[in-house]
Amino acid sequence: MASLPTLVILAGGASSRMWPLREKSLLRFGAEPLLLDQLYKYRTLGFQSIVIVGNPTNKADIDSIIAMLEGDMSVSVVVQDEPIGMGNALLQTEAVVSTQKNKAIYVTQVHDVVDYELHQRILAAHKKLPDTTHIAGYEMDDYFPGGYLRVDADGRLVGIVEKPGAENRPSNLVNIVAHLHADATVLYDAIKAEYASDAPGDDHYERAMDVLMKSHEYRVVTYNGEWNALKYPWHVLDIMNYYLSQIDGQDIADDAFIAEGASVVGNVYIGSGARVYPGAAVVGPAYIGAGTIVGNNALVRNSMVLDNCEVGFTTEIARSYVADGCAMHACRVLDTVFAENVNFSAGCTTANLRIDRDNVPTTVKEQRMSSGRDKFGAVIGEGAFLGVDVMTMPGVKIGQNVRIGPGTHVLKDVDDNHRVYVKQELVIEDDGR
């Protein structure tokens, strides 16, 4: 049996758009980091040789994930020193790929979460036409601000048009980075030629493909299954929903404690040592991690609460992602993302709905943009501590190790390592009696 192509996973690039969250590869949507979960899926598909492209700041994190990997996969990690485009990232893989007998490469991204079906379709197309390059095309009726594929009457891919506008789409096929190149050597040479041309921009990879399409056969593999891309911090909620949809029935660890009078409804996972106390309700789809406590009269629904969290008395968590070690008490966590070790004190609320019910805007790299969500609470960074009765307005992001004083209404983003509090004058007077 012929070996599969070398799998290239792009896991570098700038991650500033994800602030205040850290490394995308480390995010967990269950027991394992996203990258490790993806690697196990690729192993099931039969991939044996893998190259991961990281950056100087996440190389150690990726190495730690690789160390968890069990089995006989050969995984190499290379580093892209600067985030200067996919072309440069792919050139970092040349030394490893050149040692492989199979010169084909399959290029993917760690932050794209798709069904097995897409990879199976790409591999089947490659097996049928091994000398053809195959590019995934996601079928979308609504306009998506990305690259669109231009296909001729014979079904051959002849171009990629970036953000053409809704009225100028050459097709309904959006480019997903699931690209199986028949010959990596040809691709590397074309990318190098684009860098040698000194043309502006960082789209050398796309330009190289445009050149190659004129002399080599490129074809589209269509797909309309699940596709969730983790580009901004609120996309964590989309990825969470995908993984929650994979829970089928109730999977409750033998040593978990479910009190008489507690409710577990629908598709729910409850991990080892978790405890759900009287009056509490866990309504699926939901994930409760190992060692997590769901206290009396608390409600967790359509949410993922990872390991060793404390969901205190009367707390409601709805449509939210809560990472390890977070503590909450008598509060409301709505359409929100918590990084690890957030303390959300009694009476705190993440407001999630605008008065006009329009999509919630937020700020990314000093630019105001729409989240595309009509309900969106907050994104709160690792180690933040919010005092009693703090309220965050829709779309606010709070950085790592931030301290918010009691009674504060947070109206805008707070950078890492800051304190925010409301000054007040305490007046104590003799009432004359």
Image (cartoon, rainbow, N blue to C red):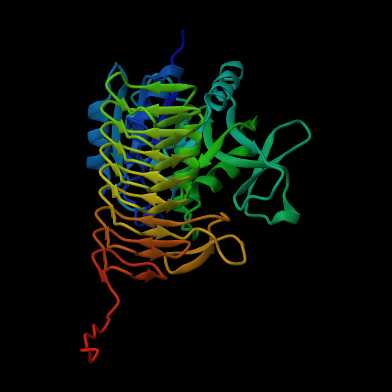
> 370 or 265: nearer the eye?
265
Residue 47: x and y in percent read 41, 20
Residue 7: x and y in percent read 42, 28
Give the quadrant of the C terminus.
Answer: bottom left
Horizontally, residue 141 falls left or right of residue 402, namely right
> 275 or 361: nearer the eye?
275
Residue 343: x and y in percent read 27, 54
Residue, far front: 433
Residue 115: x and y in percent read 53, 28
Residue, far bottom: 432
Horizontally, residue 368 falls left or right of residue 76, namely right
Q: In this view, does 238 lie above or below 259?
A: below
Q: In which quarter of the image is residue 406?
A: bottom left
Q: Is residue 31 above or below residue 323?
A: above
Horizontally, residue 76 falls left or right of residue 128, namely left
Residue, far right: 153
> 94 or 180: nearer the eye?
180
Does residue 4 appear in this view? yes
Q: Quadrant of residue 412?
A: bottom left
Number of numbered tags placed on the structure image: 0
Does residue 94 appear in this view? no
Task: Name the residue rendered at 59%, 60% in the picture.
Answer: 359
Residue, far top: 1
Task: Name the residue rendered at 58%, 56% in the picture.
Answer: 374
Q: Is residue 421 above or below residue 14?
A: below
> 97 or 117: nearer the eye?
117
Task: Name the residue rendered at 42%, 42% in the picture.
Answer: 299
